[in-house]
Amino acid sequence: MRSTQASWGRSRSYVSTEVADQAPTVSDRLLGAVWGHLVGDALGVPYEFRSPADVGPVHWGAVGTHGQQPGTWSDDGALMLALLDSLLTSGFDVEDQGRRALAWYDGNVYSPAPVFDVGITTSRALERLRAGATAALAGGAAESDNGNGSLMRILPVAIAEPGLSKRVLVERAALASCLTHRHPRAQLTCAVYCVIASQLLFGEQDIRDLPQRSISDIATVAAPELTVEVATLRDYQQRTGGGYVLDTFWSAWSAFESATSYRQAVEAAIRFGNDTDTTASVAGGLAGLHWGVQSIPDEWLRGMRGRQIVQPLTDRLLDAWRTSPHPSNPISAP
């Protein structure tokens, strides 16, 4: 890891002189989560829908599947930012989360490019929301509605506020999922991802079996309708980078767990093929939390579009942590 000082990718109020052997600070990890998710998404966009054999070498600057300019995130990143904005502005309010998701869907807020590549389950939920559905009931609840469209955006639940208990974190992740994906399997997967992300944020280094440990912990605090899905999530074996929520979760985890750097994690996620942008965004969020924002290659950060969208949100995120009086908050102002 190189020495760095703040660049446009770092908050206006954040100055780092990180050196090779220093562990990332919580500020580094918060910024790494947001930018790690977005960079993974953008890196994966050009390779989406390819088979593993057709992915080839992964490199920054490819155009590929959707014809987007390099550095463009998809619906994954836009809806993640919409959720982050909602949490920072209104606290945990699913109706507000729905309004901000529609602001992206109808008005192209939270994205540097016109809306593209929206999942079927997500688009149906947003259409129901637009027609007047309650946000917490907008998502599809059938077993066929277990795509990855809530997992891809759920990360802010784990990072927007310090000091959440595991029970509250699980409840919020599950409810936020319901905006687009209401089946308990999708809700549980989002909850497990957020619990893992929270542990990485606070510096968990022993990642061996971390999903299994998190699943076991969640089983003691989650609602009964979620716990019936525990074995299905825990025992799932497929790793193809597909759009099924369990496949995405485990493919992203496998890419992260096997890596020794942010770059390795997101490139491994993309090499699964198929839903490459989502797998890489989910893995990229974990990798950014684990290794910090300074682990993301400078070329990739510099090549990202939409700085004017992201930086005000990351500034507000760090400010929210600095001003929170919660005793577990390691970066609050004195």
Image (cartoon, helix red, strand yellow):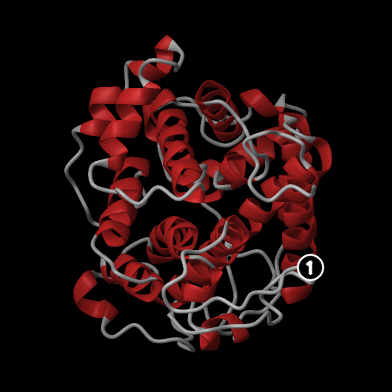
The residue shown at (71%, 46%) is 101
Horizontal side, residue 320 vs residue 67: left or right = right
The answer to which quarter of the image holds residue 175 is: top right
Horizontal side, residue 75 vs residue 1: left or right = right
Q: Position of residue 69 (x, y in %)?
A: 59, 84
The answer to which quarter of the image holds residue 75 is: bottom right
Question: Which residue is identified by label 1?
Answer: 13
The residue shown at (60%, 40%) is 157
Amino acid type for the residue under numbered disc 1: Ser
Horizontal side, residue 116 vs residue 275: left or right = right
Q: Quadrant of the N terminus?
A: bottom left
- Dot 1 lies on which element? loop
Report the front residue among 274 and 226: 226
Report the front residue among 268 and 273: 268
Dot 1, crowdedness within 10 Å: few (<14), some or many (≥20)? few
The residue shown at (53%, 28%) is 174
Furthest-front residue in this view: 334
Horizontal side, residue 232 vs residue 62: left or right = left
Is residue 109 among the parts visible in the rendering?
A: no
Q: Position of residue 106 (x, y in %)?
A: 77, 54
The residue shown at (72%, 31%) is 92
- Where 272 falls versus 182 (above or below)? below
The answer to which quarter of the image holds residue 128 is: top right
- Where 122 falls versus 135 (above or below)? below
Is residue 187 among the parts visible in the rendering?
A: yes
Q: Position of residue 226 (x, y in %)?
A: 41, 19
Q: Position of residue 267 (x, y in %)?
A: 33, 74
Report the front residue among 294 and 241: 294
User: Total label count?
Assistant: 1
Report the front residue among 148 and 191: 191
